[in-house]
Image: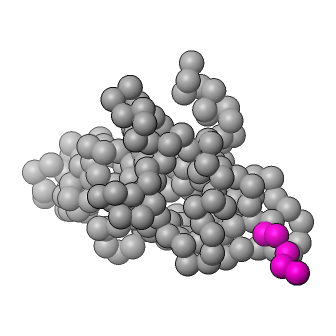
């Protein structure tokens, strides 16, 4: 007899950025793909101000999960209707998570553990991670290195403008899992559909 998982642990790795930016998060096993989206946003440090989607399988003919829009109501399944365990069926299962289609941030989300012992959790937890999330609207994985170069070099022609533009105290090397706060996914969904 196998024990049902109480929580799922995920490794979320931002693609096309070096050195790697990643988070390890734990969610209740009964959570939805919408709950996972909100947890990724909060753990990474994104502001959830752009569209997102999960791509399950091959991007050319895969299964898309996110927020349906008027332009594609039948192509994207609502994340709040899809249980995570329906997508992540075993350790090693992976999907692609895209955020901000203009900047083109992509993440690989991998199920790394199914926790079956201890008490069930009700809220996500950030277990670990490395490096700060890039600022919103900085140009994606191709614009981000330019931002970092301007911030690091006081003689760079864009240095002063980028220091002013970047979030106060932005340190690309700093991340502290203990300070991550997770929003209530149901409350965020209610705010979104008003």
Q: Residue at x 80, y 65 (%)?
A: 6
The question of residue 53 being in magenta is answered with: no
Frontmost residue, 35 versus 69: 69
Residue 8 spot, x, y in % from top left: 69, 67
- Give the residues drawn in magenta, as a range: 1-5
Residue 37 spot, x, y in % from top left: 55, 49
Main secondary structure type of the part rendered in magenta: loop
Q: Residue at x 54, y 27 (%)?
A: 192
Of all residues shown, which one is farthest toward the left? 157
Frontmost residue, 15 versus 115: 115
* The N terminus lies in quadrant: bottom right
Residue 177 spot, x, y in % from top left: 62, 63
Frontmost residue, 175 versus 9: 9
Residue 105 is drawn in which quadrant? bottom left
Whether residue 94 is visible: yes
Which colour assignment does the render follow? one colour
Q: Is residue 170 left or right of residue 40?
A: left
Frontmost residue, 190 versus 140: 190
* The C terminus lies in quadrant: top right
Q: Is residue 7 left or right of residue 109?
A: right
Q: Residue at x 61, y 48 (%)?
A: 82
Whether residue 176 is visible: no
Of all residues shown, which one is farthest toward the bottom? 1
Residue 49 spot, x, y in % from top left: 43, 36
Q: Residue at x 31, y 73 (%)?
A: 18
């Amino acid at each position: 007899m196998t024990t049902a998982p109480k929580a799922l642990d995920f490794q979320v790795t931002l693609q096309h950025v070096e050195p790697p930016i990643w988070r390890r998060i734990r969610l209740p096993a009964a959570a939805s793909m919408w709950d996972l989206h909100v947890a990724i946003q909060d753990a990474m440090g994104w502001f959830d101000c752009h569209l997102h989607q999960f791509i399950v399988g091959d991007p050319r003919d895969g299964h898309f999960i996110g927020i349906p829009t008027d332009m594609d109501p039948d192509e994207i399944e609502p994340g709040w209707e899809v249980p995570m365990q329906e997508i992540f069926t075993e350790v090693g299962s992976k999907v692609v998570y895209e955020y901000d289609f203009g900047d083109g941030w992509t993440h690989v989300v991998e199920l790394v553990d199914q926790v079956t012992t201890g008490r069930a959790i009700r809220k996500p937890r950030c277990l670990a991670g490395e490096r700060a999330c890039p600022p919103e609207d900085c140009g994606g994985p191709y614009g981000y290195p330019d931002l970092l170069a301007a911030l690091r070099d006081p003689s760079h022609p864009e240095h002063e403008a980028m220091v002013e533009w970047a979030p106060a105290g932005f340190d690309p090397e700093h991340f502290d899992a203990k300070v991550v706060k997770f929003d209530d996914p149901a409350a965020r969904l209610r705010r979104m559909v008003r």
